[in-house]
Amino acid sequence: MRLTKFTHSCVRLEHDGGVLVIDPGTWSEPRALAGADAVLVTHEHTDHVDVLRLAGLGVPVFAPQGAVLPDLAPLSVTRVGAGERFTAAGLTVTALGGRHAAIHGGQPDCANLGYLVGDAVYHPGDSLHRPDRLVETLLVPAQASWLKLTEAIDFATAVGAERVFPIHDAQLNERGLTSVNGWFAETVPGYRHLAPGESA
């Protein structure tokens, strides 16, 4: 499976001719969706879903039950819940978790699903929900208002994936990204930073 990282939390997975894109938000590059066969949305925040772009794409979109997506354009969405297994772009997907991580000061959270794709790649969205099985590749949130770096490191260490790539990093400047990458690289085996557009 070829994995290409795009800005922030957007990831493109290609396997046997199928293209699956996760969390193409307003900060991600439109080219991430070129030739996409299906899209997974972890939750409703605009840095993870660009409704207008998806409405024009015309491919199956999967999102959590209870996610409130802006009514900006007609968008056909298949709602999924935690524990469900389904097929998207020819790949088996298991939905895990259920809620967004606590943000700050009692601000309401929202529905959030992590997706385990092909029983190999795990994208947790905006949560640190640990999968109940081993995964080969973990996409770990690197920076957020709801996150401390030590929590992300502990999460990645506990999951114990062979390969670990950062996501949710668009608000880091160059100095911050260097610091975060340094900490992950020193503490998490298999960690590697992918720049937007870079594949592994």
Image (cartoon, rainbow, N blue to C red):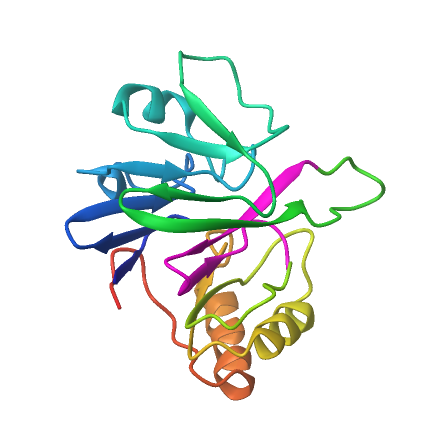
Question: Where are the magenta residues, as a range?
Answer: 110-128
- Residue 23's place in the image compared with 188, above or below, is above
| Residue ID at (36%, 58%) | 118
Q: Position of residue 117 (x, y in %)?
A: 40, 55
Q: Position of residue 84 (x, y in %)?
A: 54, 44
- Quadrant placement of the N terminus: bottom left
Please give left or right for residue 150 compared with residue 161 in the image.
right
Q: Is residue 9 visible?
A: no
- Residue 93 among those drawn in magenta: no
Please give left or right for residue 61 compared with residue 161 in the image.
left
Please give left or right for residue 102 compared with residue 166 in the image.
right
Q: Position of residue 38 (x, y in %)?
A: 31, 37
| Residue ID at (28%, 42%) | 89
Q: Is residue 135 visible?
A: yes
Question: Observer-nearest residue: 19 or 119?
Answer: 119
Res. 199 image quadrant: bottom left
Res. 45 image quadrant: top right
